[in-house]
């Protein structure tokens, strides 16, 4: 199973290799997460998510193990140039495009059209949202699955940036895995961090 987990990480590295960038400092405070990926917008598999900036994603070791509580439980952050309006509609729109694009690229059956994702978000606080995403799992089961998702937005007014933090898991919000996910937060200096393109 460890070999399978590592192979999934390599798949992500391959998918994001075109847009992957070097960045010396993390946006997020993380603990015991194995794999980190950083890549630049617009993302090659979802160019319709039309932002400038970068994504920083983290995957736990058992992300691909269907018997683990860590299965499909991960987080990513977006650092976006400009003061972006963040609401339920923008989150639903952006994540539908993101996951539809990702699963279409991962799908290797040329005779199969990946079903569209469906997304729903509700406001959970001044800058926080919770929701669900129904998507096709092209990585593992080749079937539909539902992810619970939380999203938090932050404005970097002096730097003219918008930060978004997404946490995902098929487990319910009261599951233990969400304690791990909620511990992932933006660093205090996240607004100051930019990408370093070599």
Image (cartoon, grey):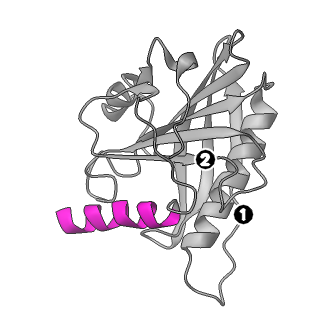
The count of marks equals 2
Numbered label attached to residue 116: 1
Q: Is residue 10 left or right of residue 154?
A: left
Farthest bottom residue in view? 111
Q: Quadrant of residue 112?
A: bottom right
Predominant SS along the magenta part: helix
Q: Which mark is residue 40?
A: 2
Say which label, 2 or 1, has the lower sequence index: 2
Question: What range of the chain is rendered magenta?
Answer: 1-15
Question: Which type of secondary structure does the marked residue at label 2 adopt?
Answer: strand
Circle 1: element type? loop
Quarter assignment of residue 197: top right
Q: Is residue 31 magenta?
A: no
Q: Residue at x 73, y 54 (%)?
A: 97
| Residue at 69% from the left image edge and 79% from the top image edge | 113
Residue 133: x and y in percent read 62, 47
User: In this view of the protein, which residue sits in the foreground, 98 or 179?
Assistant: 98
The x, y position of residue 44, in whole percent, is 66, 61
């Amino acid at each position: 199973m460890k070999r399978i987990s590592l192979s999934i990480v390599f798949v992500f590295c391959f998918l994001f290799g075109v847009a992957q960038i070097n960045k010396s400092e993390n946006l997020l405070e993380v603990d015991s997460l194995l794999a980190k990926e950083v890549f630049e917008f617009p993302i090659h598999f979802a160019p319709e998510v039309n932002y400038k900036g970068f994504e920083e994603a983290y995957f736990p070791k058992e992300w691909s193990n269907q018997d683990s509580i860590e299965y499909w439980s991960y987080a990513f952050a977006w650092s976006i140039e400009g003061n972006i309006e963040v609401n339920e509609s923008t989150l639903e729109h952006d994540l539908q495009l993101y996951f539809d694009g990702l699963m279409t690229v991962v799908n290797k059956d040329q005779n199969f059209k990946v079903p569209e994702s469906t997304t729903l978000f509700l406001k959970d606080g001044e800058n926080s949202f919770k929701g669900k995403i129904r998507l096709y799992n092209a990585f593992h089961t080749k079937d539909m699955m539902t992810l619970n998702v939380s999203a938090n937005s932050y404005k970097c007014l002096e730097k003219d940036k918008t930060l978004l933090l997404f946490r995902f898991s098929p487990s319910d919000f009261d599951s233990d895995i969400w304690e791990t996910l909620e511990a992932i937060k933006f660093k205090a200096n996240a607004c100051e961090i930019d990408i370093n393109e070599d």
